[in-house]
Amino acid sequence: MEVIIVKGADAVAEMGAQLVCELLNKKPKAVMGLATGSTPIALYQKLIQCYQQGEASFRAVTTFNLDEYIGMTADNPQSYRSFMDRELFDQIDILKANTHVPSCGLDDNPRAIGTAYENAISAAGGIDLQILGIGSNGHIGFNEPCSSLSSRTRVKTLTESTVRDNSRLFSAGEFQPHLAITMGIASILESRRVTLLATGAHKATAVRDAIEGPLSARCQASALQTHERATFIIDEAAASCLEYRDYFRWANSENTPIIEKFGNFYELDQT
Ligand code: F6R
């Protein structure tokens, strides 16, 4: 596991954007896994700038989002589909037909929808780079504490803490769903490369549990410890509870010459 600690939220977004641009330049038909929430917004703004400055094209890219509220139609401004259109897709050259956000209506069979979503990811060739945020309870996607670490795309009931964390995005009296469809931990771990972005002191204990804690369903992000190519890009505040943070800084400075020589996606040379 690679842990990169940078100064603040802007540097996290910048480093995430560099990784995405490097991937797209190496593999223009890349398949990306995307997240919603506050954290990736700065990354998406950087990617829009990269596109505008001709440093990246999304023309041939396919995307799969992690999750969506159940019963939330695409035209609802609170839906994750609306979020992605607004924050990224409408401002880059991606073909909307190549963007996927899971969608499950109240009367849909969630198991059939989950299986179809997993099949669509496989048919696209699997995810090259999965972008993740982390909940203050350690969730990735909407895989809440004590979900199976072998989970696949399915319905999850959100915990009270997640509902509370996300209530900032809903106005008083507005309906806030408590159910979501989410890619599972097994689905996420199949991505060829995973990058988790975290900023702010409110993420520090979740980040510590994910990186240094025992591998445990209690902290879903700890499952990334089993991934061959998982990178945490975190700011100082999010890194503040890490016992090994000096080691991570040192390891990173030792790795930099290798990355400068071979790039971040040298494994793609073999595919
Ligand atoms: C959203 C998602 C969630 C968020 C997490 C952090 O698609 O997958 O796991 O990444 O809840 O959200 P923010 O970034 O708003 O703190």
Image (tube, rainbow, N blue to C red):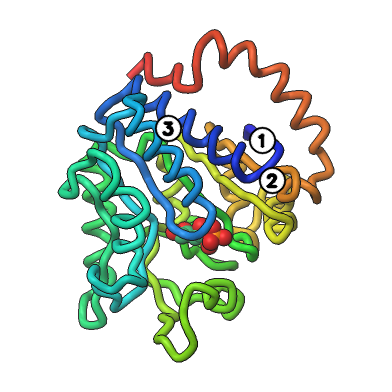
| Residue sitting nearer the eye, 203 or 141 | 203
Q: Residue at image x 71%, y 50%?
A: 238
> Residue 150 location in percent, x, y?
47, 56
Element under disc 3: helix
- Image label count: 3
Quarter holding residue 235: top right
Q: Residue at image x 62%, y 60%?
A: 138
- Please state which of the two labelled residues, at mark 2 or mark 3, is closer to the viewer: 3
Which residue has dot 2 on it? Answer: 211
Judged left or right of residue 209, residue 117 is left
Please state which amino acid type lies under the numbered disc 3: Val
| Residue sitting nearer the eye, 191 or 253 | 253
The quadrant of the image that shows the C terminus is top left
Which residue has dot 1 on it? Answer: 3
Sequence order check, earlier mark of 2 and 1: 1
Q: Residue furthest left?
A: 97
> Residue 157 location in percent, x, y?
46, 77
> Residue 24 location in percent, x, y?
34, 27
Q: Where 77 falls versus 171 (above or below)?
A: above
**Residue 67 in view of the camera:** yes
Which residue has dot 3 on it? Answer: 20
Pointers 2 and 1 in contact (C-beta within 8 Å): yes
